[in-house]
Image (tube, helix red, strand yellow):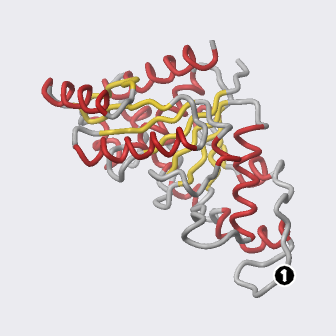
Amino acid sequence: MAEDLKIAVAGKGGVGKTTVSGVLARSMARQGSKVLAIDADPAMNLWLSLGLPKDALASVIPLSENDDLIEERTGVRPGSIGGVFSLTPKVSDLAERYGIRGPDGVMLLVLGTVKSAGGGCMCPANALLKALLRHLLLDRRDVVVLDMEAGLEHLGRGVVKGVDALLAVVEPSFRAIETASRVKNLAYDLGVKRVYAVGNKIGRDEEALFVRREVEKAGLDLLASIPLDPAVPDAEMAGLSPIDYAPYSEAVKAIEGLGKRLKEIVVS
């Protein structure tokens, strides 16, 4: 099943967005989609949620730190003084060249951190990463799941306009929902038309009501509620993805439902 669906996942640290990203990517692959999962979070832990063995990452250099590649494609080595570098480097081959094939055929691409405009000027590394993201989100004809930081400033309008849906993952806390509200405002400013909240770690009825009420106040639609599930931390302690450790657990089933709902909204 060939589909063109680009999903970005953001949220405050610790809310479980990387778990959601990894299980979402795996479940969509199991539903017949060709899936590319992009790790653009500084923590770079998406491999575990995807179910890749740690030794598969032993020789992986995040593209943002691959100085040889950056110099090859932009013409300037990071850290060098002066020099004119390409703002439109060739990137169409990088996913296949540096991607790691994982379970269910999901390909993982470890991007590393894209610096924000305020945190450091445009540089060769940023030029390469932004050109790559633009290609993957606008030109690639399959499902892309982007696990990212809470902020969107580092992407810019030319990149995020390729995002079909942005998921702001929240847990039952005011701080998580405040972060989601900021993400929503940034996304709207950059032209992302579909921004949804995804509740995670929902343990009690009171927490479910709190999340629904507060995300509504923040102007967000709640697309899914994922229960607090002991299988998720158990899977992490076992070094496995939840979808492998407990494929019929409540959290995994909820994320599978989230994937189906996204296809209904965006693809249908």
Q: Nearer the viewer, residue 268 or 158?
A: 158
Name the residue at 65% across, 31% down. 143
Looking at the picture, does residue 210 appear above or below residue 55?
above
Residue 165 locus on image (x, y percent):
55, 31
Residue 261 locus on image (x, y percent):
49, 17
Looking at the picture, does residue 19 appear above or below residue 268?
below
Which residue bears the numbered disc 1?
83
Quadrant in which residue 113 is drawn: bottom right
Quadrant in which residue 74 is drawn: bottom right
Residue 138 locus on image (x, y percent):
74, 38
Quadrant in which residue 208 is drawn: top left
Badge 1: how crowded within 10 Å, few (<14), some, or many (20+)?
A: few
Q: Is residue 105 left or right of residue 147?
A: right
Name the residue at 82% across, 76% down. 76
Name the residue at 30% across, 41% down. 177
Q: Is residue 123 left or right of residue 222?
A: right
Total marks placed: 1
Secondary-structure class at tag 1 = loop
Looking at the picture, does residue 135 appear above or below residue 207?
below
Residue 160 locus on image (x, y percent):
63, 43
* Quadrant containing the N terminus in the rendered view: top right
Name the residue at 49% across, 61% down. 42
